[in-house]
Image (cartoon, rainbow, N blue to C red):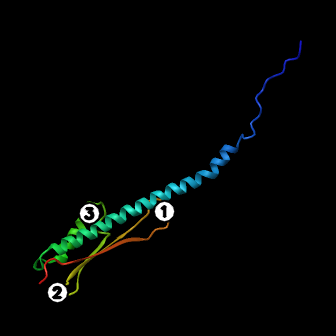
Amino acid sequence: MSPRRCQTRPVSRRRGSYAIEFAFVLPIFVALGGGVLDWGWYFSQEYKVQTAAKVCARTGVATDQAEDPEGTAEAAGSAALTEQGISGTTATLVATPVGATPEEMLTCDVTVPFTALVGLVPTLPSLRAVVTMRMEDQP
């Protein structure tokens, strides 16, 4: 009879390498995911600010000159910000008449402070949108 040999599995040479590779790759994936969240949040908030500025300007230029278009525009812009979940107390919204008849225009300037969700991507401290439209009712 021949001696029996114990059959054992060969020892894997990659015993801890998977954990080490994971430890190297995980921070990169976390940083990429955080960056995607931050940029997505930034562009979402920027779109909301631009929409509020457009609503402000459009409402102001459609309002009759005798009915305070600046006040109406600012109220509409504040309402648009509130509808989109941005606090009107932290936002700065200014409607200003520009020019003279027959080319009188209304400029709406909306500024909102911005805070990143994760903070991995450098962003601006505030978001700003400026929209200028020609007044429909010229005196």
Q: Which residue is mark 3?
A: 82
Q: Nearer the viewer, mark 2 or mark 3?
A: 2
Residue drawn at x 31%, y 70% as measured from the top left = 91
Q: Please state, as top left, top right, bottom left or bottom right, where the N terminus lies in the image.
A: top right
Label located before the other in sequence (2 or 1): 2
Q: Which residue is mark 1?
A: 119
Local SS, label 1: loop
Label located before the other in sequence (1 or 3): 3
As drawn, the label of residue 101 is 2
- Residue type, numbered disc 3: Thr
- Label 3 Cα neighbours within 10 Å, binned few <14 / some 14-19 / many ≥20: some
Q: Is residue 129 left or right of residue 133?
A: right
Residue drawn at x 19%, y 70% as measured from the top left = 59
Label located before the other in sequence (2 or 3): 3
- Residue type, numbered disc 1: Gly
Q: Nearer the viewer, residue 92 or 30?
A: 30
Residue drawn at x 72%, y 40% as measured from the top left = 15
Q: Nearer the viewer, mark 2 or mark 1?
A: 2
- Label 2 Cα neighbours within 10 Å, binned few <14 / some 14-19 / many ≥20: few
Q: Determine contact: label 1, label 3, CB under 8 Å.
A: no
